[in-house]
Amino acid sequence: MPIMMYRDALRRALYEEMKADPSVFVLGEDIGLYGGAYAVTKGLLEEFGPDRIRDTPMSEAAIVGAAIGAAMVGGRPVAEIMYVDFMTLTMDQVVNQAAKIHFMFGGQIKVPCVIRTQQGTGRGAGAQHSQSLESWFIHTPGLKVVAPSTPADAYGLLRASIQDDNPVIFLEHKGLYAVKDEVPEEPFVTSLGVADVRRTGSDVTLISYSRTMQLALEVAAQLEQRDISVEVVDLRTLQPLDMETVLRSVEKTRRAVVLHEAVMTGGLGAEVSARITEALFHQLLSPVRRVAAADAPLPANVALEKYVVPNAEQVIRAIEETLAVKQQIAR
């Protein structure tokens, strides 16, 4: 299979969907002539023209509002918000309008709108340009939330999101754009709401998504040298959650650790941990542990960022603590 960058896989998905469906168009700041802040839309203006690759004013509320309106009357807009931190300026549009229109109009109106936005650390961009805010959107019924960790998933999940009749928040980690991996040459679509077991194991299940999936796989490879078998589950879609795959894995290993870059308090790890505990309490050999960012604003310094976000040492420690529990809970 050809090797492709994450950003190029996203561009390929946009290109193929726009070729296949004239109702698909892209709008956002600097997506046309400039090619997007992270070069995802580079070259699309020349291919599709300014009517379908629309540079917008610097107003996130206007971008998302226009996208929602277009979706309600038959379009399939893909809106780009340069940083997830700027989604604060769209929250009324997203949470009170896009997420609820289908329900409040008795199913008569659909909102097939994708909002692509970039989040995460790695560039020392500071507290207003580096957050991971997926939990805000997961908390809102009516939204789907996607966070791919590989180029293949970025391609397949973006195509699925554009084809979906519901509003989708599509989260792209800034640290993944240059990541390279295999992407099948033949077109494909990856179903939303389906997790993937990236690595099989028997001792503990490590659950993650987005950029920390790379960290999860690195830790699993390190621990294999110590005869610790780690099964790694990539959630891929955060809403709806594929708990069936997660529970099947934890039922086998009877131990679980959840890893994400978002802050600990109120993070997705708490939800996943609670659902595992509710479903498998009497089968677990140890409490479910979480590894997440510290509850602190992110510093504008790459070196200092590393003290806030999860690292391999923390993940290994959590797994070791999970395996160290000797007491067997009666079935």
Image (tube, rainbow, N blue to C red):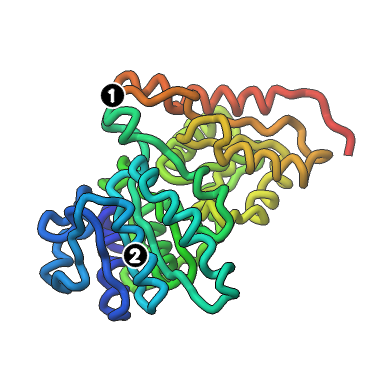
x then y, percent, for residue 301: 27, 22
Read off the residue under disc 2.
67
**Residue at label 1?**
300
Asked if 283 appears above or below 236 in the picture, the reply is above
Q: Which residue is drawn at 30% across and 20% down?
A: 303
Q: What is the x, y in percent for residue 40?
A: 23, 56
Q: Image quadrant of residue 307?
A: top left
Q: Where, quadrant-wise, is the N terminus in this rendering? A: bottom left
Callout 1: few (<14), some (14-19), or many (20+) C-alpha neighbours within 10 Å? some
Residue 222 in view (yes/no): yes
**In the displayed structure image, the side of residue 107 where residue 125 appears, left or right:** left
Q: What residue type is labelled 2?
A: Ala
Residue lying at the far right of the rendered structure: 330
Residue in the picture at 83% in, 39% down: 282
Label 1: element kind: loop
- Give the Cα separation between the discs numbered 2 and 1: 32 Å
Amino acid type, callout 1: Ala
Q: Identify which residue is drawn at 83% across, 29% down.
A: 328
Q: Which of 76 and 192 is in front in this view?
A: 76
Q: Where does residue 315 sit, x and y in percent of width and height?
A: 53, 28
Nearest to the observer: residue 331 or residue 167: 167
Camera-nearest label, 2 or 1? 2
